[in-house]
Image: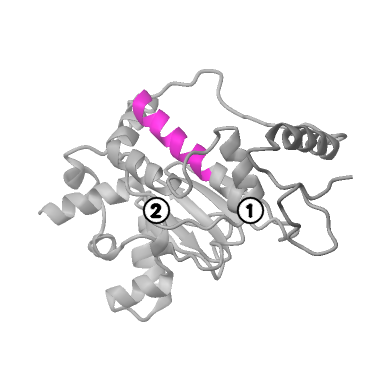
Amino acid sequence: MPKVLEGERAAVPGRYAIVVSRYNHSVTSKLLRGALETLAAGTSDPEIHLAMPETLEFANPAHAHAIFRCVQEAITNAVMHRDWFMEGANVFVEIYTDWIEISSPGGLPKGMKLSDLGRKSIRRNALIADLLHRITFIEKAGTGIKRMRDDAQDQRCPAPIFEDNGFFTAIFYPNPEVRAQADTRQEPSTPQVTGQVTGQVAGQASVEVLKMLEIMSGEMTRVGIQAALGLKGRANFEERYLKPAIEMDLVDMTRPDKPRSSKQKYRLTVKGKIVQEECNRE
């Protein structure tokens, strides 16, 4: 039966404890291994389903590797910091044409704010964090967000977006230039977004659509966009501004599977961001 080692005291009266110290490392390692083997006995191996085309090419391997590192870091953080007591909730990885989202149940740990990310770290699940650190799957605590931001900056990708609304969500966007290169390789006959985007795309967009692109920043609700444009009528806004922008692939929904969701927001696509930048230069 486990007992308190000499010179140490149990943290809770009446309970036994094993305390790690420089004098009992070998004993504790054996006990820990046995405990973990007992816990893992009968646990089924995880199933991994990966769907991908027979041929996979990268317009820019260095960029693809940087995005992979960011996503790997975000998934590790999601598993390590999620709230495991939220029944029925899971870590979600959602891959869209122009962005990737990783969502973790539980939001930020108590005492953390979005402004603290990259500067402060609170471990919600200390045992999981310690295990991942022991097997060198993670490095120093609190460095993951900084690495994601640095990798995105090095590859000239938009900075990752982090949200906290009951779930903690990390959103990654590709480098617009690399995305355009990938489009060119996949659909060479389709007009691409280049330095002449103002003439090709903005020239086809209505004045109303261009006005909406000018005021958009990050993710915005319909009400927020209308307020920024000084518009009150929903039907007029959706018919003359929002719908054409979505059809031209300049704006997309954060919840495309639920168009009428009360949590629906809108944001610029990579194509929309390039049009916005071109218009701002004029």
SS under mark 2: loop
Picture coordinates of residue 250 (x, y %)?
34, 51
> In the orientation shown, which residue stands out farthest toward the front?
7
Q: Residue at x 71, y 31 (%)?
A: 26
Query: Is 95 in front, or is 149?
Result: 149
Question: In what quadrant of the picture does the C terminus appear?
Answer: bottom left
Three-letter code for the amino acid on which mark 2 is drawn: Gly
> In the orientation shown, which residue stands out farthest toward the top?
55
Picture coordinates of residue 215 (x, y %)?
26, 65
Three-letter code for the amino acid on which mark 1 is drawn: Asn
Picture coordinates of residue 234 (x, y %)?
42, 76
Query: Is 93 in front, or is 110?
Result: 110
- Residue at the spot of label 2: 118
On the question of residue 94 being in view, the answer is: no
Q: Residue at x 17, y 54 (%)?
A: 279
In this rendering, the answer to whether 2 lies above or below 124 is: above
Whether residue 66 appears in magenta in the rendering, the answer is: yes
**Mark 2 neighbour class, 10 Å CA radius: few under 14, some 14 to 19, many 20 or more:** some
**Mark 1 neighbour class, 10 Å CA radius: few under 14, some 14 to 19, many 20 or more:** some
Left or right position of 40 against 185: right
- Residue at the spot of label 1: 125
Question: In what quadrant of the picture does the N terminus appear?
Answer: top right
Q: Residue at x 67, y 51 (%)?
A: 90
In this rendering, the answer to whether 269 lies above or below 23 is: below
The range drawn in magenta is: 60-74
On the question of residue 90 being in view, the answer is: yes
